[in-house]
Amino acid sequence: MLKYWVVVPTCLPLVLRRCHVCASEHFRASGKFRVNANHKLIDVWLLALCTACGETAKFTVLERMAVRSIRPELLDRLHDNDPGLTADLLQDPVVQSRNRIALDWNNAWRLDTGGSDHLDREVIDVSVRFAARIPVRPVRLIAEGCGLSRAEVERLITEGKLVSAVRLSGKLSSDFTFTLKR
Ligand SMILES: [Zn+2]
């Protein structure tokens, strides 16, 4: 039996960044952008708020770019504070490295298994797709999706009853498949 699971974001991830006011380490994207156009150049920041004290942080999205080099569609989304654009930019590796931020996806995703009809099967093949690059432990994912404890999943891996082309220990954030034989 072939099953398709999807790891789906349920909300925006938090941004890991130390607050210079209260030393909290989490910011939440406000959903707003600040756009500063000066003659032919434009600066754009993504605004976020400290989850503890509410201090505002600005993350650079565009820095002194020629206005005419920017797609009009992107400008519209910036001016409209497009929520999907916030999600895309937070996950953009260029934005992350430029601002030295990382994302905290805890409690910001769920696993969609499309039903539980696989639970009593002896052999299942599962294709796991990530709707966003969310780092997740496959052991945790498989435990949740198959109604097993993490210790049981570890044991099935050790016994060779749970196999995959990827390493199931550690974290993954891209699509993989596995086979479970009980
Ligand atoms: Zn703070």
Image (spheres, rainbow, N blue to C red):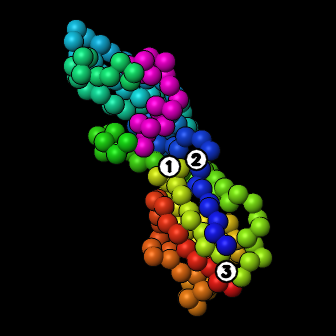
Q: Are marks 2 and 1 in contact (CB under 8 Å)?
A: yes
> Which structural element holds mark 2?
strand
Residues drawn in magenta? 75-91
Query: Which amino acid type is shown beneath numbered disc 3?
Result: Val
Residue 18 visible in the snapshot: no
Residue at which label 1 appears: 132
- The residues tagged by marks 2 and 3 sit, at their Cα atoms, a distance apart of 28 Å
Predominant secondary structure, magenta span = helix
As drawn, the label of residue 123 is: 3
- The residues tagged by marks 2 and 1 sit, at their Cα atoms, a distance apart of 7 Å
Left or right: 167 as drawn, with respect to 142: left
Q: Are marks 3 and 1 in contact (CB under 8 Å)?
A: no
Query: Which amino acid type is shown beneath numbered disc 1?
Result: Ala
Q: Is residue 101 above or below residue 59?
A: below
Residue at which label 2 appears: 9
Q: Are marks 2 and 3 in contact (CB under 8 Å)?
A: no
Q: Closest to the observer: 174 or 122?
A: 122
Left or right: 74 as drawn, with respect to 158: left
Residue 93 spot, x, y in % from top left: 34, 45
What residue is rendered at 58% in x and 77% in y? 179
> Which structural element holds mark 1?
loop
Residue 148 visible in the snapshot: yes
